[in-house]
Image (spheres, helix red, strand yellow):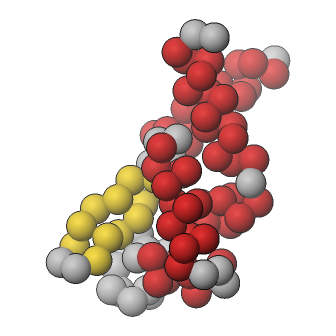
Amino acid sequence: MTKPEAAFDLVLHAVADPIRRRILQSLKEKNAGLLETETGLCALDIEERVRLAQSTVSHHMAVLRKAGLVVVKKRGLYRLYHRDEKAIAQLLRDLNHRLS
């Protein structure tokens, strides 16, 4: 399997899970989370929005980060998670190209 194919498979695996799709959708919405930022959510915000335990959210965030769909930025003691919109746009282009 070529490197681009392996990366594509990793991204598809990440978005195949409905919980991870809910997390990506939550990260897209403007919010008034714990840190009251316009974009990005801390882990606690994600836990509350998708109603999952911290360990489960951590697992899903690791999968999304590894796939390159989410980036994390430190802000004080917190980590803010953001969607990587360029990576998501690339996924959509790749899907369109492979399915047409």
Residue at figure coordinates x 35%, y 59% from the top left: 72
Q: Could you tell me residue 80's position as x and y percent?
A: 35, 69
Q: Residue furthest left?
A: 76
Task: Identify which residue, 60 or 73, lies in the foreground.
Answer: 60
Q: Could you tell me residue 61's position as x and y percent?
A: 51, 60
Side of 25 relative to 64 (left or right): right
Residue at figure coordinates x 73%, y 26% from the top left: 96
Height in image: 80 above or below 50? Answer: above
Task: Identify which residue, 89 or 21, lies in the foreground.
Answer: 21
Side of 51 relative to 60 (left or right): right
Task: Identify which residue, 49 or 85, lies in the foreground.
Answer: 49
In which image quadrant can residue 10 be found? top right
Height in image: 16 above or below 56? Answer: above
Q: Could you tell me residue 93's position as x and y percent?
A: 63, 28
Q: Is residue 27 visible?
A: no
Q: How many marks?
A: 0
Q: Residue furthest top?
A: 2
Residue at figure coordinates x 54%, y 73% from the top left: 55
In which image quadrant can residue 22 be found? bottom right
Picture quarter with the N terminus: top right
Height in image: 25 above or below 47? Answer: above
Side of 25 relative to 37 (left or right): right
Side of 36 relative to 21 (left or right): left
Q: Residue furthest front?
A: 55
Q: Is residue 72 visible?
A: yes
Picture quarter with the C terminus: top right
In which image quadrant can residue 40 be found? bottom left
Q: Could you tell me residue 24's position as x and y percent?
A: 59, 60
